[in-house]
Image (spheres, rainbow, N blue to C red):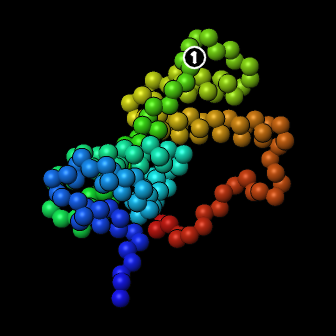
Amino acid sequence: MTRHYIFDSIQRMLENTPQEQWSTSPLVSRALLNCPRLGGIIRNLMIKRAVKLEWMGDIRSEVASIVQMKMLAKLDSPQSAYFVAYRVAQLVIYNWGKTEENTFFTQEVSINECKLENENDQELMDRLNLEGGFFNDGSESEKALDKALARERLARKLEQHGWPAEIPRERKRIGRPSKE
């Protein structure tokens, strides 16, 4: 009975190639680039990391070159090729995910040149001009600003329409009675 190996083309190629030639062989390079198992690993990691799938070819070629040029010389056996390839793919994809998040280029706009057209623009300018926003990534100051703006909007709405009749004005304490 013959065994059919579907998803271990890298391992079979490494077994058929002398270990000294692993890092320079074009056959090993072709196996790394065309292996469906490695392609599936890379695709799953890209989906997990939310990296654009249109970069699959670039990431796949980068993983293949790193594995062949740097990692195959350190392998002890062909059976561990997929473990190493998985970790290399993981690190490469995490790096691509970081560059996608951190290198978003836009045209610079001066705050002084912005013209305020309505009230929402003023809120945006208030957020940009917060002094404490740079120290804690702006999240705490944005929450405080959002609360204050929400209170102002509610007060204006109540002034315009009045207090709703179905909602009582006084709050009734529900729960455990006080100790007094």
Q: Compared with residue 50, is residue 37 higher up or lower down, i.e. above or below?
A: below
Q: Give the x, y percent position of residue 100.
A: 47, 38
Nearer to the camera, 131 or 66: 66
Query: Tag 1: residue type?
Result: Val
Q: Compared with residue 108, is residue 161 higher up or lower down, i.e. above or below?
A: below
Quarter of the image where one finds residue 2 = bottom left
Relative horizontal placement of residue 18, taking residue 128 as reference (left or right)? left
Q: Give the x, y percent position of residue 36.
A: 44, 62
Mark 1 is surrounded, within 10 Å at the Cα level, by few (under 14), some (14 to 19) or many (20 or more) other residues, namely: few
Residue drawn at x 83%, y 43% is 162
Q: Which residue is mark 1?
A: 109
Q: Is residue 72 visible?
A: yes
Position of the N terminus by quadrant: bottom left
Nearer to the camera, 97 or 137: 97
Residue drawn at x 73%, y 53% is 169
Nearer to the camera, 144 or 20: 20
Quarter of the image where one finds residue 81 = bottom left
